[in-house]
Image (cartoon, rainbow, N blue to C red):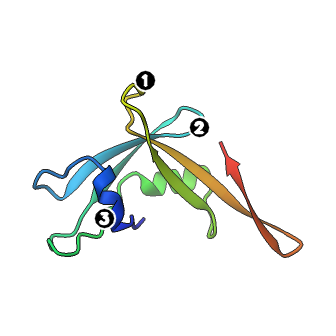
């Protein structure tokens, strides 16, 4: 999954490397681990989530139109995860599109 470049400032620092581990906790308290990597080029880094992302997509049954949001957690998070992850499903009712949250 491609991550907007402007989100780099919210991620842990890469410290000269190209990959970092990112942990996120869902609404049920399950911890998900992802690898976020950036391109070698220093001008346009374009971060992507790779390892762990496919497992998350399959487990949550994500479909085209669903939205995934990461929220930065406070320093006192009990799980050790720096982020919360939330899935919002796209729902069509009589042609109108609505969203609802999935736990």
- Disc 2 to disc 1, C-alpha distance: 14 Å
Task: From this view, report whether residue 91 is shown above or below residue 26.
Answer: below
| Residue found at x 29% / y 55% | 9
Q: Position of residue 38 (x, y in %)?
A: 24, 64
- The quadrant in which the N terminus is found is bottom left
- The quadrant in which residue 41 appears is bottom left
| Residue found at x 43% / y 37% | 73
Q: Earlier in the sequence, mark 3 or mark 2?
A: 2
- The quadrant in which residue 42 appears is bottom left
- Disc 3 to disc 2, C-alpha distance: 24 Å
Q: Earlier in the sequence, mark 2 or mark 1?
A: 2
| Residue found at x 54% / y 32% | 29
Determine which residue is flagged by label 1.
78
Q: Position of residue 35 (x, y in %)?
A: 31, 52
- Disc 3 to disc 1, C-alpha distance: 27 Å
| Mark 3 and mark 2 residues within 8 Å of each other at the beta carbon | no
Q: Label 2, secondary structure: give it.
A: loop
Q: Residues within 10 Å of mark 1 (few under 14, many from 20)?
A: few
In front of the other: 83 or 54:
83
Which residue is most to the right? 94
Q: Position of residue 84 (x, y in %)?
A: 48, 41
In this image, 18 relative to 77: left or right?
left
Q: Residues within 10 Å of mark 3 (few under 14, many from 20)?
A: many
Q: Earlier in the sequence, mark 3 or mark 1?
A: 3
Query: Is residue 49 something that shows in the picture?
Result: no
Determine which residue is flagged by label 2.
27
Q: Label 3, secondary structure: give it.
A: loop
Q: Label 1, secondary structure: give it.
A: loop
Determine which residue is flagged by label 3.
47
Task: From this view, report whether residue 64 is shown above or below residue 85.
Answer: below
């Amino acid at each position: 999954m491609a991550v907007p470049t402007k989100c780099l400032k919210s991620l842990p620092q890469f410290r000269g490397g190209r990959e970092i581990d990112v942990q996120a906790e869902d609404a049920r308290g399950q911890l998900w681990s992802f690898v976020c990597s950036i391109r070698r080029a220093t001008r346009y880094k374009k971060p992507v989530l790779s390892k762990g992302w496919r497992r998350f997509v399959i487990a949550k049954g994500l479909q085209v139109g669903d939205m995934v949001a990461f929220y930065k957690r406070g320093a006192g998070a009990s799980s050790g995860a720096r982020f919360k992850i939330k899935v919002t499903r796209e729902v069509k009712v009589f042609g109108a599109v609505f969203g609802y949250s999935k736990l």
